[in-house]
Image (cartoon, rainbow, N blue to C red):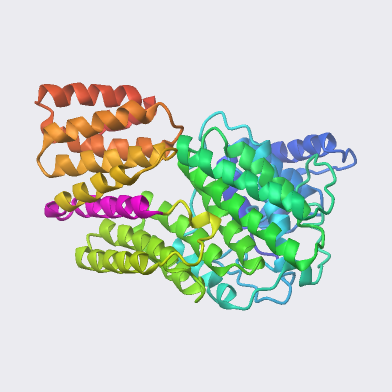
């Protein structure tokens, strides 16, 4: 018992809108449904959890996580509730403090447990809408400072780490899951192939339709990681977990589940690190950085990119380093730092050109090709054009080149290229060309389930406002309103755009 208020639980309790007596009754009812009919929680116990920081015994933390998850419409874990005991972080330094309540980085034996718990809660959650998706994200500076020393230390497989008898995580998922068994190389081959199938689907159609399938596969891998496989198999299994977690995070970001997405990116970084793959851990954190730029927090993105670059290690291939530079450049463009952005993109081009192809890229980098390089450069220059309109012409050139190079199966990327190109044309005072490319983007919008395309489309819609008197642009604006979700239309209309 800490004798200090549990501010995490208090904040969530306030959001849920329950009374203490109501929460006590719900705990007893849910515990009985989960096979614990003997539990008898009352109002005074709830008060001690919140006001005095008392940590209840199992299964109460799992029961509360289930209740808050259902109530708030987003995943709430035991850590989110503030129920983590001090002194159980293993040999690694416990980084938890007021700014880092989730105790990042995790001890090696906790990664699989956290992965399994979080995916289990995510699968259970029935999101009728995106209520709670706007909950606070952990800022980039907190993530980077908490994980810096850990990411730069020598890797240690969880199979090599001591098993700590933590009652909070002995059965962290708390859901009906069949008992997994140790597996061999052929089963891991199949898992690795499934990652490629999911990755291709995401690139073609967006994250909405396959997100739960990826989360379910990741949940099963979390169960497999509870066993001590031979080291080579264990590392491959951690690699599968990292790849699936990145996909789950990217798909969650793609449909607007931002806190969920960030948690998956952090899980991915931990999984990659436990498997000894520093470049993969860095790439996972770069996804969180891209998310921050998309959400209008480029300064936090730059904090994360510093960690991603420095923690990736010397074995990182030039193409991977080029990709990291393009994300850094986009963040710089968002802040209007044109000179820094151009210098960073120059470094990206040099690194990409220096990759001789003699070392095959890892599977998670095969999507970043020359088309993606130009696509990211188009996005960076289009973003900079909001501050420096002269950059619009360069953005157009890169977007056109990206479209020329795009292969089949990259529909979402093509939509982004068209939107970047149309937006740059609007900024460059060429409404006729802008109208043409905007309509090409609209023709493909129905083929994907990506909320990020809607976000980019809203940005382009804003740029059409200065040409509202043009008949063709008026027609375009009406067509965009038909494509955007109803809440987005209300937003743009209330803004007077």
Q: Nearer the viewer, residue 355 or 243?
A: 355
Queried whether the magenta region covers residue 374, the answer comes back as yes
Where does the image place residue 18, in percent across and percent down from the top left?
A: 63, 38
Quarter of the figure that contains the C terminus: top left
Camera sees residue 274? yes
Queried whether the magenta region covers residue 9, the answer comes back as no
Camera sees residue 47? no
Q: Quadrant of residue 65?
A: top right
Where does the image place residue 27, in percent across and percent down from the top left?
A: 76, 40
Where does the image place residue 367, in percent across and percent down from the top left?
A: 46, 51
Predominant SS along the magenta part? helix
**Position of 276 compared to 325: left or right?**
right
Name of the residue lying farthest toward the front: 358
**Position of 99 compared to 374: left or right?**
right
Determine the residue positioned at 49% across, 66% down: 142
Q: Nearer the viewer, residue 184 or 176?
A: 184
Q: Nearer the viewer, residue 92 or 350?
A: 350
Determine the residue positioned at 55% across, 67% down: 98
User: Which stretch appears magenta?
Assistant: 369-391
For residue 226, above or below residue 407: below
Where does the image place residue 325, in percent across and percent down from the top left?
A: 36, 64
**Position of 158 compared to 475: left or right?**
right
Quarter of the figure that contains the N terminus: bottom right
Name of the residue lying farthest toward the right: 38
Q: Quadrant of residue 467?
A: top left
Determine the residue positioned at 68% across, 44% down: 217
Determine the residue positioned at 13% across, 51% down: 389
Q: How many marks?
A: 0
């Amino acid at each position: 018992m800490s004798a200090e208020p549990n501010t995490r639980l208090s904040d969530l309790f306030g959001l849920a809108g329950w009374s203490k007596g109501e929460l006590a009754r719900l705990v007893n009812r849910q515990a009985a449904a989960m096979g614990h009919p003997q539990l008898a929680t009352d109002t005074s116990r709830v008060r001690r959890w919140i006001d005095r920081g008392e940590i209840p015994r199992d299964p109460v933390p799992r029961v509360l996580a289930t209740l808050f998850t259902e109530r708030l419409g987003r995943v709430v874990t035991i850590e989110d509730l503030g129920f983590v005991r001090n002194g159980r972080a293993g040999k690694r330094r416990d980084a938890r403090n007021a700014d880092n309540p989730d105790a990042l980085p995790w001890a090696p034996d906790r990664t699989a447990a956290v992965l399994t718990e979080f995916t289990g809660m995510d699968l259970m959650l029935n999101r009728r809408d995106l209520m709670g998706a706007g909950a606070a994200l952990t800022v980039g500076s907190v993530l980077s400072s908490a994980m810096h020393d850990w990411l730069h230390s020598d890797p240690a497989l969880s199979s090599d780490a001591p098993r700590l008898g933590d009652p909070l995580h002995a059965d962290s998922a708390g859901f009906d899951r069949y008992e997994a068994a140790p597996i061999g190389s052929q089963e891991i081959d199949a898992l690795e192939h499934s990652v490629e199938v999911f990755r291709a689907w995401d690139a073609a159609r967006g994250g909405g339709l396959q997100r739960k399938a990826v989360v379910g596969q990741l949940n099963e891998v979390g169960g497999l990681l509870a066993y001590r496989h031979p080291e080579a198999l264990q590392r491959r299994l951690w690699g599968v977990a990292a790849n699936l977690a990145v996909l789950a995070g990217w798909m969650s970001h793609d449909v607007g589940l931002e806190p969920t997405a960030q948690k998956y990116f952090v899980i991915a970084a931990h999984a990659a690190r436990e498997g000894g793959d520093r470049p993969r851990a860095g790439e996972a954190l770069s996804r969180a950085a891209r998310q921050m730029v998309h959400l209008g927090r480029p300064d936090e993105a730059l904090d994360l990119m510093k960690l991603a670059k420095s923690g990736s290690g010397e074995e990182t291939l030039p193409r991977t380093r080029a990709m990291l530079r393009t994300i850094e450049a986009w963040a710089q463009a968002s802040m209007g730092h044109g000179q820094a952005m151009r210098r960073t993109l120059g470094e990206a081009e040099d690194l990409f050109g220096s990759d001789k192809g003699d070392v095959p890229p890892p599977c998670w980098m095969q999507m970043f090709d020359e088309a993606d390089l130009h696509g990211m450069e188009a996005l960076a220059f289009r973003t900079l054009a909001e501050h420096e309109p002269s950059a619009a012409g360069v953005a157009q050139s890169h977007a056109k080149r990206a479209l020329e190079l795009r292969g089949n199966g990259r529909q979402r990327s093509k939509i982004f290229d068209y939107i970047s190109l149309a937006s740059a044309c609007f900024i460059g005072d060429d409404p006729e060309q802008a109208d043409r490319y905007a309509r090409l983007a609209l023709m493909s919008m129905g083929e994907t389930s990506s909320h990020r395309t809607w976000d980019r489309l809203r940005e382009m819609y804003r740029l059409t406002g200065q040409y509202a008197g043009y008949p063709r642009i008026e027609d375009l604006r009406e067509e965009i309103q038909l494509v955007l979700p109803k809440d987005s239309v209300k937003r743009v209309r209330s803004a007077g755009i």
